[in-house]
Amino acid sequence: MTGAGMDEADFARARAAMVETQLRRREIHDPAVLEAFRAVPRHLFVEEKQRGAAYGDHPLPIGEGQTISQPYMVALMTQCLEIRKGARILEVGTGCGYQAAILSRIAPEVFTIERIPSLSRKAEEVLDGLGYTNVRFFIGDGTRGLPGFAPYDGIVVTAGAPRVPQPLVDQLADGGRLVIPVGGRWSQELIVLHKGRGGVAQRGVCGCVFVPLLGDHGW
């Protein structure tokens, strides 16, 4: 669907329906997460020819072999971070910038790193156009994290890893959470690591499918 003939009111209604039917009914309950999804215009993060499908319950291609994740999965990963007031968040895999935009509505500081320069530049343009000024963009190997700005209260990885990259664990603050898909190239399990004084605890959340995480500590 191209979205031809749809105006901002149509997109707003589609966004509200997405929140109610895809998120609230699937136990996305964090008020800050729900409010962020009501506010961020997802259709501006996809190609114009895909805008009519932007609020559907599925991922969409964004070019360069990458995708924008299903709205529910973005919401679930964000909720799993349990973002606290004043949190500093690192996103690995900027993609189209939608996840970073959601995070920017909840956390005061967001850092995002992408290995594909064209995607990073386009995402930065979209967020700048929306007036989101608390996101800093970087190009490079996200599996190494961004040690110069660590520690982070939350780290979210938007690609599937064969194992948890140790640099990301090292860059977590005490009490911080790392949300990451781990498994094979074609399917993974979404896991949450919580770094506490007694070490790192891990729990599985659900099965998922993401594009591969490429880099020194990925594929």
Image (cartoon, rainbow, N blue to C red):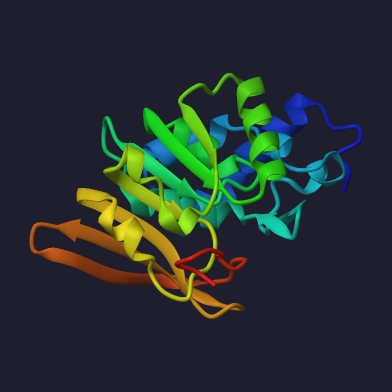
Judge whether 69 appears above or below 208 on screen. Answer: above
Q: Nearer the viewer, residue 179 or 120?
A: 120
Q: Is residue 136 visible?
A: yes
Instruction: Tell me the quarter of the image containing the C terminus.
Output: bottom right
Q: Nearer the viewer, residue 109 or 191?
A: 109
Q: Residue at x 54, y 49 (%)?
A: 140
Q: Residue at x 21, y 67 (%)?
A: 201
Residue 25 pos. (x, y %): 49, 55
Residue 30 position by quadrant = top left
Residue 193 pos. (x, y %): 29, 63
Judge whether 66 appears above or below 161 on screen. Answer: above
Q: Is residue 123 left or right of residue 60?
A: left
Q: Is residue 175 left or right of residue 185?
A: left
Residue 152 position by quadrant = top left
Q: Is residue 28 visible?
A: no
Q: Residue at x 57, y 65 (%)?
A: 214
Q: Nearer the viewer, residue 37 or 172?
A: 172
Q: Residue at x 43, y 40 (%)?
A: 33
Q: Is residue 7 left or right of residue 159?
A: right
Q: Residue furthest right?
A: 4
Residue 163 position by quadrant = bottom left
